[in-house]
Amino acid sequence: MESRKPTVGEIDGGETSESSTTTERDRQDESGADLGPLGAQLEELFSAIMTATDPDGRILNTVFQLLPSKKSYPDYYEVIESPIDLKMIATRIQQGNTIFCLRLVGLYCTA
């Protein structure tokens, strides 16, 4: 049986992180635009991230699915200026959040 790649929509269900709520800035950025080929490429990239494994076959995305608790890990939020988790990324890609997606592409292209 061939393993199926998860889609952006599949990460958007289930648990929520403390910081997965939409901020005012996020609401201003949400355009709901159809991203066309860019959206398809982001979906493909997201699927690759969700299925990436280490040499022993362990999935690598687990620790990035949800942000850590602010109470348990306050230092994380001091070091990381704009924390984001995979659930938040999936939601923004699904919504066609143009500004966010272009920022994501910019980060990917400069890495």
Image (cartoon, rainbow, N blue to C red):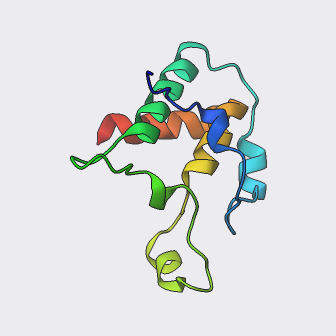
Question: Residue placed at 47% from the left, 56% from the top?
Answer: 62
x and y percent of residue 78 in the render? 49, 80
Depicted 88 relative to depicted 74: above or below? above
24 and 64: which is toward the camera: 64
Q: Residue at 56% across / 71% down in the picture?
A: 68
- Residue 17 rendering spot, x and y as whole percentages: 67, 64
Residue 24 vertical position relative to residue 81 in the rendered view, above or below = above
In the displayed structure, 46 sits above or below 40; it is below
Q: Looking at the image, which residue sits at the far left?
A: 55
- The quadrant of the picture occupied by the N terminus is top left
Question: Foreground residue, 78 or 7?
Answer: 7
Residue 61 coordinates in the image, percent (x, y)? 44, 51
Q: Nearer the viewer, residue 73 or 25?
A: 73
Q: Report the residue that reaches farthest toward the front.
A: 1
Residue shown at 72%/52% (left/top)?
14
Horizontal side of 69 relative to 109 (left or right) equals right
Residue at 69 percent of width and 69 percent of height: 18
Looking at the rendered image, the quarter that the C terminus falls into is: top left
Q: Is residue 5 above or below residue 26?
A: above
Please give the count of numbered marks on the rendered protein: 0
Work out whether residue 85 or residue 48 is closer to the camera in this orientation and state it. 48
| Left or right for 64, reference 66 | left
Does 73 sit left or right of 54 as displayed?
Answer: right
Q: Position of residue 56 (x, y in %)?
A: 24, 50
